[in-house]
Amino acid sequence: MVSRVIPVESFDLVVFGATGDLAKRKILPGLYRRYVGGQIPEGARIIGAARAEMDDAGFRLLAEAAITEFVDAGKRQGDLVARFLDHLTYVAIDAKGDAGWDRLKVAMRDGVVQAFYFSVAPALFGDLAERLHRFAIATPEARIVVEKPFGRDLETARALNATLASHFTEKQIYRIDHYLGKETVQNLMAVRFANILFEPLWNARHVDHVQITVAETVGVGGRGAYYDKSGAMRDMVQNHMMQLLCLIAMEAPYRFDPDAVRDEKLKVIHALEPVGAEDIVRGQYRATKDAPGYVQDAENPASTTESYVALKVNIANWRWKGTPFYLRTGKKLRARASEIAIVFKEVPHSIFGDAEGWRENVMAIRLQPNEGMTLSVMIKEPGPGGMRLTEVPLDMSFAEALGEDGADIPDAYERLIMDVIRGNQTLFMRGDEVEAAWAWTDPVIAGWEARGDRPKAYDPGSSGPEDALMLLHRDGRRWREIRE
């Protein structure tokens, strides 16, 4: 299968925080892979900007080291790396002062797409936005990319939106959530809205429940100080998992257009019902003889921050009334896996009576690892001796189904950065969408804080606290096993 590479215009991409971890792990390696893929024109330039004093040669050495560490050796052959590095320049800049901004202004070109990636702490977003305008660097068509966390509650999200809106229009602001750049997430929309097979079944009449799982095997590690002020609810549910829920539950937009898609996602958020205390389970991984627990990683013995959270969520609209959505995410769990499972209802009448082996049909959408989809169906078990049923999966691993193209699925950041250059906001969050998500999340957090709830301890390497099992068991359901 031959993929169609959509060309982009020549551009100047300024990466603020270019010496930071995200730039080295994702942004620079991702841009290099897009260069190898033919999506970065020879006239494009990538301008690193950070406080560190460094010249172009030093920045290129930093980028080369990042590419060596995070890009497969097969893509680093010949002179590809050297040719890519020729596109890189560097400007030392003070985000909260005036040093370096005149140099950046001189470095920018007229007549090309301008994009500014804010790969810095959110506290610096306003400073960067203000100086881009005060020094007349950003044009009216320039685009800015801002990373999460986009606020830590509704009040701070509104303030941040207002700060950015004082310098840029909503059409210029790209709030990035890398989960939306994953191939499987986008294929969820294709499966739903490009196939007549599934959409008639995608409702409360046929779907028993939906499970969304984002499980990690690592702890908070070096992020302890940040994470302890955030927790799983703010770090994962309010953004990543909310976006996944919206894509599953949304109505078909009138066309595949940025605002049309985001309008439908916003309707889902507005339809979310409040979550009661009985529908929330919070957990915190405990210490073992071989490894520290959460409170040691966070360096806060009195911490009540959750490293795990599970919720039962209901959507008050015609399509989904009566179909619960179960969300869970956590650190130090049994396996690293991100999955959406649509569990369909039983057949209304079984002509096979009590035939052994019956299971419900499940569509499982794997985001990581091994992106793909499976649909479990029931067939007759081969052999004589009566009607025995067995479950078999219709399995589509993208790497296998799409051959060589599938084996080279772009990283989410690669796709999203190229969408910024193209001016396509479909996979980016809109300001009102962010605020609506916080408006639903804040009362959930305020509720457990007012009750003084403490998270339940769970063992590292488990599937989470025991109470989370009861969240489904009391409804006659069970969590799917977490597996790689």
Image: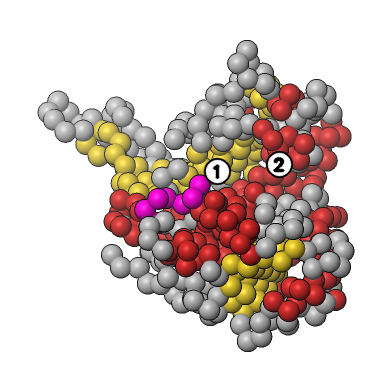
Identify the residue under disc 1.
212
**Residue 326 drawn at (x, y percent):** 58, 40
Q: Are marks 2 and 1 in contact (CB under 8 Å)?
A: no
Horizontal arrangement in the rendering, residue 481 relative to residue 388 (left or right): right
User: Label 1: few (<14), some or many (≥20) within 10 Å?
Assistant: many
Q: Please name the amino acid that badge 1 sits on.
A: Ile
**Residue 160 drawn at (x, y percent):** 82, 61
Q: Is residue 110 above or below residue 413?
A: below
Q: Is residue 83 magenta?
A: no
User: Label 2: few (<14), some or many (≥20) within 10 Å?
Assistant: many
Identify the residue under disc 2.
233
Q: Residue furthest bottom?
A: 111
**Residue 346 drawn at (x, y percent):** 41, 40
Residue 206 visible in the picture: no
Labels 2, 1: front one:
2
Q: Nearer the viewer, residue 209 or 394?
A: 394
